[in-house]
Amino acid sequence: MNIQPIATNNISMGKHPDKANSKNYINRFKQKVIDALPKATFNDNEKNLKRWTNFTEKISRPAENRFIMGGTAIILQPIIDATNKKVDESTRTVSICRTIAKIIAGTTVGILVRGSCYNLVKNMTKPEGTNKFSKALLPKRYTKEIGKVEAFLKNYRSALSNIVAIGAMCFTNFLIDAPLTVLLTNKFSDVALQHKNDIAKSKEEDTHG
Amino acid sequence: MAKPFDNALDWVAKHFRKDASKMLIWTGVAGWALSSLAQVGAVLFNPKISTEQKSFLVPQELADAAVNIGAFFLVTQATKRTVAKLFSTGKFAPKSVRAFLEKNKDVYSNKVGKLDFDLDEILKSKKNAGFPAEEYYACKNFGTTIATVGAGVLSSNIITPIVRNRMAAKMQKNYLNKKEIETQNTTTVYTPKGSMRI
């Protein structure tokens, strides 16, 4: 087992002995995690390299990333709420409705805002662009480097558009997201209540009829 | 005016151009914080909710936000760092990097998989001109980004709802108990004089 040697100079360097010890424990733990995993080698032929770069760029894009989060949320979260036995049935129903409403409102607005910001940033970060806006958001100090390495340009675009989107969301979250969540929660709760009443009514009819 | 703006763009490029997963974590945290703030605002400024209910719902939303942001940050950061470390120590590597390490095994053979071994630092040294940097970064970025997105899904869509539901159920129970005690006390106040309560 590969365990890192304990640094003996920590105390002499003026660090508190407890802190030095806890750092050593953390490093030992990290080393154990690395040791526990097998060595892996990945085939980096041209096809795979292209695939990796494209996939990384796609799932890092703000709108696509929000879609993955929202898509998995709508599958998983209502199931978790539905199996929550710690609350009564009516609370559970409202909780499911609110979760679904929150996810639909958040994901829809999130994708629209982030997607628009990405397109805006993309059009204003073109190293080969000819008009005055096409280079407006390129970083002066890194333009050359970003122009040479496509992956760096794509990462920069994703990061900048995510930051711009967060700025836009300061308004959209309050003006659209939250009111839309309330509206959808009420709508879904009404539908759920109506459905529950219908079932109760048909059961009653079956008993009498 | 143009200077701070240019500096801000340079800052974004400096910190995020090489590592997409780092950006996903920080913008994710900021996004969740804003979203949670909006949900708190929706409760706070909703005229249909009474002040008494707000005193329960606002802390509940804040607790939800704390769990969501905390779990997202801790889980994604830990996963991302672990996967990044596996690549930077050479434990996980693309074929060309493995070949480079094998070729220079007199220098690196004992270092691969050791915590203090860092391929990113080797890249900075001019002695290692033959290091396949593009392949290394493409593979490392792919691994860390998938790990970050996966950890984000796990924390936001599985861990947070489970913890939030448990916390909310506990808070609701405490709230109902408090209400029951208050109702009992009110009844006591209005009992006729002479009927002493022990």
Image (cartoon, grey):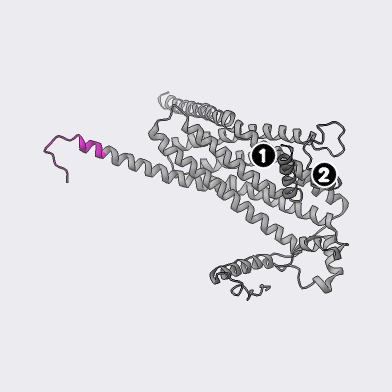
Letter of the chain that mark 2 sits on in the rendering:
A
Residue toward you, A32 or B35: B35
Write down the chain letter for disc 1: A
Q: Residue B158: give x, y in percent of width and height.
A: 58, 47
- Vertical relation: A52 (above or below) B35: below
The mark total stands at 2
Q: Position of residue B6 (x, y in %)?
A: 75, 41
Which residue position holds label 2? A143
The range drawn in magenta is B184-198
Dot placed on the residue nearer the N-terminal end, 2 or 1:
1
In the image: residue B2, left or right of residue B37: right
- Residue B189 shown in magenta: yes
Could you say which quadrant of the image residue A204 lies in? top left
Residue found 13% across the figure and 39% down from its top: B195
- The picture quadrant where one finds residue B100 is bottom right
Q: Secondary structure at mark 2?
A: helix
Amino acid tagged 2: Thr
In the picture shown, does residue B150 fall above or below A177?
Answer: below
- The amino acid type found where label 1 is placed reads Arg
Left or right placement of residue B182 versus residue B37 in this view? left
Percent x, y for residue A202? 46, 26
Q: Residue at x 34, y 43 (%)?
A: B177
Which of A187/A27 is in front?
A27
Dominant secondary structure, magenta? loop
Q: Residue A25's mark?
A: none
> Label 1, on which residue?
A66
Residue A107 horizontal/vertical position (percent): 63, 35
